[in-house]
């Protein structure tokens, strides 16, 4: 395949059929996997060197930089290039006052203890990595947005969920409903890949109400679901949500429900 095909694959501008062919060949052919990995490295180099067109830069940022692994690959490539450039510059002798000052600095730096030098080098590395991260990181976490959208489609159509499938389940009642501020506890080691939430709602709730759901870990928002309708059961109305285990590391959580002008409902739970 030509280099341009690999480039378009990583930029997300390749048609579905050839993209599927590439993904299949990567699994089946080690030599092909190495070839496409080299093409990916070349694309990163072109991005860092400013050799991509404005359109390709837009595609790179929005379609390529969408996983933590890819972001880290670009960050590391940028860091290694910078360090290599600095080493090359340091090896060139220029007989002027600036080079003599630099030489004096390096002699002084070399006279420091090993512990001090390592601490200074670590600090410099953190500064460089942080700078690269802020330059390259996409404006939004596209992976999280995609995950939220996928589960939102499921939760807006709860009949599509297999109710007989074995899932860990969490039943929540709001402090607004039972005058209890205690948090429900769930063991993190017992959680399945997906968790079914059953959330008690006020008795007057009908199935035309829609809720926007926001989940906070401590004070940080971790997940959101919009326009979720309740189920009205003989035991009382409830909201059912299927949510991914991966968004729930150990910690304290608050699930917030908003519906029009009605008072917010808050539910507390702990993953231990």
Image (spheres, rainbow, N blue to C red):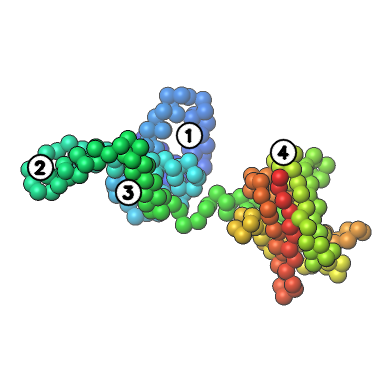
Q: Secondary structure at mark 4?
A: helix
In this picture, is 134 found above or below 259?
Answer: above
Extreme-left residue of the structure:
95
Quadrant housing the C terminus:
top right
Distance Cα–Cα, label 2 vs label 1: 50 Å
Query: Does residue 31 show up?
Result: yes
Q: Position of residue 203 (x, y in %)?
A: 87, 67
Q: Nearer the viewer, residue 50 or 127?
A: 127
Say the numbered circle drawn on residue 189: 4
Q: Nearer the viewer, residue 64 or 92?
A: 92
Distance Cα–Cα, label 3 vs label 4: 47 Å
Q: Nearer the viewer, residue 134 or 48?
A: 134
In the picture of the structure, the residue carrying the numbered disc 1 is: 22
Q: How many marks?
A: 4
Label 1 with label 3: CB-CB less than 8 Å: no
Q: Position of residue 209 (x, y in %)?
A: 77, 67
In primary-sequence order, the first of circles 2 and 3 is 3
Q: Position of residue 256 (x, y in %)?
A: 70, 62
Query: Does residue 210 show up?
Result: no
Instruction: Indicate the quadrant where residue 54 lies.
Output: bottom left
Q: Position of residue 83 (x, y in %)?
A: 29, 40
Distance Cα–Cα, label 4 vs label 2: 62 Å
In the picture of the structure, the residue carrying the numbered disc 3 is: 52
Q: Secondary structure at mark 3?
A: loop
Distance Cα–Cα, label 1 vs label 4: 38 Å
In primary-sequence order, the first of circles 4 and 2 is 2
Say the numbered circle drawn on residue 94: 2
Please tell me which residue is depicted at 52% across the width and 53% down the height of the picture.
141
């Amino acid at each position: 395949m030509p280099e341009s095909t690999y480039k378009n694959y990583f930029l997300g501008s390749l048609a579905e059929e050839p993209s599927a062919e590439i993904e299949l060949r990567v699994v089946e052919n080690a030599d092909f996997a190495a070839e496409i990995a080299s093409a990916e490295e070349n694309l990163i180099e072109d991005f860092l060197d400013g050799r991509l067109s404005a359109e390709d830069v837009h595609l790179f940022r929005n379609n390529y930089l969408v996983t933590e692994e890819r972001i880290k690959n670009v960050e590391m490539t940028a860091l290694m290039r910078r360090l290599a450039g600095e080493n090359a510059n340091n090896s060139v002798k220029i007989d002027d006052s600036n080079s003599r000052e630099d030489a004096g600095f390096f002699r002084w730096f070399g006279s420091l203890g090993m512990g001090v030098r390592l601490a200074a080098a670590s600090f410099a590395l953190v500064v460089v990595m942080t700078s690269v991260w802020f330059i390259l990181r996409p404006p939004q976490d596209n992976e999280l947005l995609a995950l939220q959208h996928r589960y939102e489609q499921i939760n807006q159509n709860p009949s599509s969920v297999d109710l007989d499938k074995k899932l860990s389940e969490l039943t929540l009642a709001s402090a607004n409903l039972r005058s209890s501020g205690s948090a429900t506890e769930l063991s993190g080691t017992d959680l399945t890949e997906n968790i079914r939430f059953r959330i008690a709602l006020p008795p007057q709730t009908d199935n035309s109400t829609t809720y926007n759901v926001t989940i906070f870990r401590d004070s940080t928002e971790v997940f959101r679901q919009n326009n979720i309708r309740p189920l009205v059961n003989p035991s009382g109305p409830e909201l059912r949500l299927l949510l991914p285990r991966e968004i729930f590391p150990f910690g304290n959580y608050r699930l917030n429900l908003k519906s029009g002008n009605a008072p917010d409902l808050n539910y507390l739970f702990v993953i231990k």
